[in-house]
Amino acid sequence: MGYSLKKDFSFPKEQRLLKTKEYRASFDKGFKFLTPAFVFFAQQSVRPRLGLVVSRKVGNAVCRNKIKRLLRESYRNLTAKPDYDLVVVARSRSKSSSLSEVSKTLCWSLAKIQTLMNKAQERA
């Protein structure tokens, strides 16, 4: 009877952006990075948090929730979390994305954003 495969697959509030003010700060003061399927906004913060924006332009509720699940799972599976707040805005091309595509895009984009942030710190 010792089936103990249960792991913690939750996404706690401490790891999420919750307030409009937090999203607005990332949009206004953060770095912006575009991919065909997503737009990423990153802003320095004390602890890494994720915010997701998937509008009705992307698709119906089932499609929007699928995209959010894929993004959360990709972010949760990262071996090293970024040291900034990340807001991901889904574009209509994200509809047909699979988990592997979303994971690759997220990892590649985080590396590019980290490079942009390092360059900005060097200039300052």
Image (cartoon, helix red, strand yellow):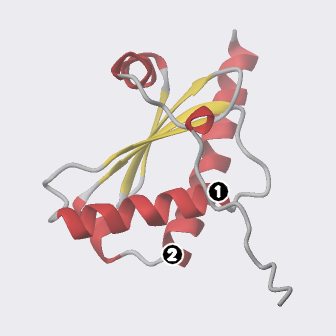
Q: Where is residue 43 in the image (x, y as percent from the top left)?
A: 56, 25
Residue drawn at x 86%, y 86% as measured from the top left = 2
The residue lying toward the viewer, choosing from 63 and 97, is: 63
Which residue corresponds to the image point at 68% horizontal and 62% vertical from the top-left? 77
- Which tag, 1 or 2, sits closer to the chain's start? 1
What crowding class fits label 1: few (fewer than 14 Cα within 10 Å), some (14-19), or many (20 or more)?
A: some
- Residue 30: percent from left, percent from top: 49, 23
Question: Which residue, given by chain and number where applicable, does mark 2 sit on?
Answer: 99
Q: Foreground residue, 18 or 31?
A: 18
The 10 Å Cα crowd at callout 2, few under 14, some 14 to 19, many 20 or more, is some
Residue furthest to the front in view is: 1
Residue 61 position by quadrant: bottom left
Q: For the view shown, which residue lies furthest in the right direction?
A: 2
Residue 103: image tag: none
Q: Name the residue under label 1.
A: 76
Q: What element carries label 2?
A: helix
Amino acid type of the residue that numbered disc 2 sits on in the rendered structure: Leu
Q: In which quarter of the image is the C terminus?
A: top right
**Left or right of 65: which side holds 113?**
right
